[in-house]
Image (tube, grey):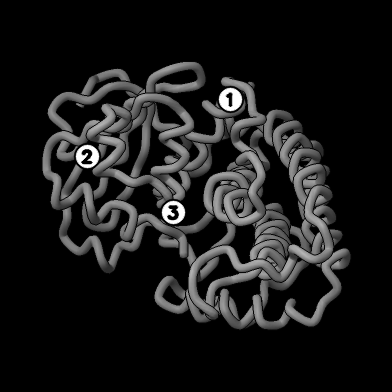
Amino acid sequence: MDAVPSLILEPGRPAPPRGPFDPLVLAADIRLVATLLGEELGRIGEGRWRHRSGHGNDAWTLHDVVGHMATIAEIVDTTAAAALGETVELPADLPARDGIAAFNRQRVARTRSQPTIITVDRLAGALERSAARAEAMTPADGARQARVPTYGRPIRADEALAVQLTHPVVLHGPQFADAARLERLVEHLGPDVRHRMLERAIQLMTATCDRERAGDLRAVVAFEVGGAGGGTWWLSIAPGTVIAGRGMVDRPTVGFRIANTSVAFCLLAGRLNAPLAMLERQLRVSGDRGLAGRIRALVDPG
């Protein structure tokens, strides 16, 4: 590994100013995403909210997807508040990693009888509360932590607030947009915002990595994203420790060379046809290809 790559975030240390986890940058990006989401949701006709986002009768409807985003946004905002020392209670039924899928299904089922306008308002309200929270906190506040069973380690306040961006834009934005036949939200973001989104997504892998599944794995995963908004990052996985940083690394265990940010977001969302992308030279995978196929299962937050 290079001698110079700095950690993206370290426990107890404020994030670098004007970087992706700077409180004012987080606040501005959350408000931007909230505005774009509001515009996108406003384009959905009343009759399309029951349209399914995938194949099969058990696939979530568009209403379900927004209900899930609203639920997670509210939990994430409460998590940030807890990290900041506010007197709040996290949901008592928040699960450990292996219970996330069932938890999500249960919470989505609760929203199905809720009018769509209420569900959309819940999402907008949670995002605005988080934006205001980020705007009011200092960089030192951002480094304060809360313990949540879903994550593999205590989560920082600024990391929790970053989930308000990565969850609706990276993880579920493509799912919703594709089913609604709308342009993906990320396509409306400028290169600087895309760069910050990628860095946040990779940093959050250090919290979402399933340490039980990883076991005694020792690996360095490198990401090289070309084009405007791209960059280079690495993720280091070892027993009990997962860290991320910026820059190139020598001889990574797995290397992902990605043509541009649009392809990178598809890869992170699990919506990339990897064989086709490699054939079209949009994606190149080097090193341990068996491990490359496991990475998303290890870091997917559920």
| Lower position in the chain sequence, tag 2 or tag 3 | 3
Q: Who comes first in sequence, dot 2 or dot 1?
A: 1
* Tag 2 residue: 220
Q: Quadrant of residue 142?
A: top right
Q: Is residue 188 above or below residue 118?
A: above
Residue drawn at point x = 64 percent, y = 49 percent: 181
Name the one closer to the observer, 176 or 254: 176
Secondary structure at badge 2 equals strand
Query: Mark 1–mark 3 contact, CB under 8 Å?
Result: no
Q: Is residue 156 visible?
A: no
Q: Nearer the viewer, residue 157 or 177?
A: 177
Q: What residue does disc 1 label?
A: 19
Residue highlighted by disc 3: 207
The numbered mark, 1 or 3, whose residue comes first in the sequence reads 1
Residue closer to the observer: 27 or 139: 27
- Amino acid type for the residue under numbered disc 1: Gly
Q: Mark 1, residues whose alpha carbon is within 10 Å: few (<14), some, or many (≥20)?
A: some
SS under mark 3:
helix
Give the x, y percent position of residue 39.
81, 42
Query: In the image, residue 171 lies at what x, y percent?
Result: 53, 52
Q: Inspect this view and state whether residue 205 appears.
A: yes
**Residue 45: image location, x then y, percent:** 82, 57
- The answer for how far apart the CA atoms under marks 2 and 3 are is 16 Å
- From the viewer's perspective, tell me whether residue 129 is left or right of residue 257: right
Q: Position of 269 compared to 77: left or right?
A: left
In depth, the one of 262 and 200 nearer the eye is 262
Residue type, label 2: Val
Amino acid of disc 3:
Ala
